Image (cartoon, grey):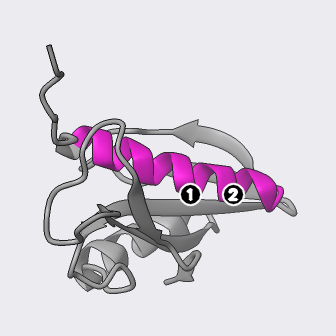
Amino acid sequence: MRDERRTLTEQELHNLAMNIVGRQLEADGFEFMAVNSKPKKNPQFVCLKDKILHFIIVRHVNHPENPRTYDEGLLAKMKNHADKFEAKTYYAGVGLSNATDQNIPVYLNEDYLVDYQGLIEV
């Protein structure tokens, strides 16, 4: 019996985006102070690097949306919050799409494409 294809849920896509960003942050020498994997609870990462606090908002973005485009209102609110802690604010948009056909969903245990170009300072 062949297993049914299962589309990744919003939470699974968010977790995948967080893993991609988290690995990059770790490779860049960031120290994790707090991690929040709830998509609407911001920031997703609070990190320390060079004695400076960093607030990082992570969003997964479906094809054909641009992962570099962000909600300016949300990020302005987050930057305001970060400023109280003398923290820097960043947006990390991660484009995720099916490797076979970008117009169909990302499925569990199937190849996918990643469009992540790094942190955008707000």
The magenta stretch is 11-29
Q: Residue at x 20, y 81 (%)?
A: 64
Task: Find residue 40 and report its horizontal and vertical position in percent.
Answer: 24, 50
State the residue lying farthest toward the right.
50
Q: Decide which of 70, 95 is in the foreground and name it.
A: 95
Q: Residue at x 35, y 44 (%)?
A: 110
Task: Find residue 12 and report its horizontal and vertical position in percent.
Answer: 30, 39
Q: Is residue 6 above or below residue 27?
A: above
Query: At label 2, which amino acid type do we have?
Result: Leu
Q: What's the magenta bit mostly, secondary-structure-wise?
A: helix
The residue labelled by disc 2 is 25
Q: Decide which of 17, 31 is in the foreground and name it.
A: 17
Task: Find residue 51 and report its horizontal and vertical position in percent.
Answer: 84, 59
Q: Is residue 108 left or right of residue 85?
A: left
Q: Is residue 79 above or below residue 4?
A: below
Task: Find residue 92 and report its horizontal and vertical position in percent.
Answer: 47, 69
Classify residue 66 by image quadrant.
Answer: bottom left
Q: Is residue 23 left or right of residue 71?
A: right
Is residue 81 visible from the viewing direction of this image? yes
Task: Give SS at disc 2.
Answer: helix
Q: Is residue 86 left or right of residue 6?
A: right
Query: At label 1, which amino acid type do we have?
Result: Val
Q: Decide which of 5, 66 is in the foreground and name it.
A: 5
The residue labelled by disc 1 is 21
Q: Residue at x 16, y 21 (%)?
A: 2
Q: Is residue 86 above or below residue 43?
A: below
Task: Give SS at disc 1.
Answer: helix
Tell me whether circle 1 and circle 2 mark residues in contact (CB < 8 Å). yes
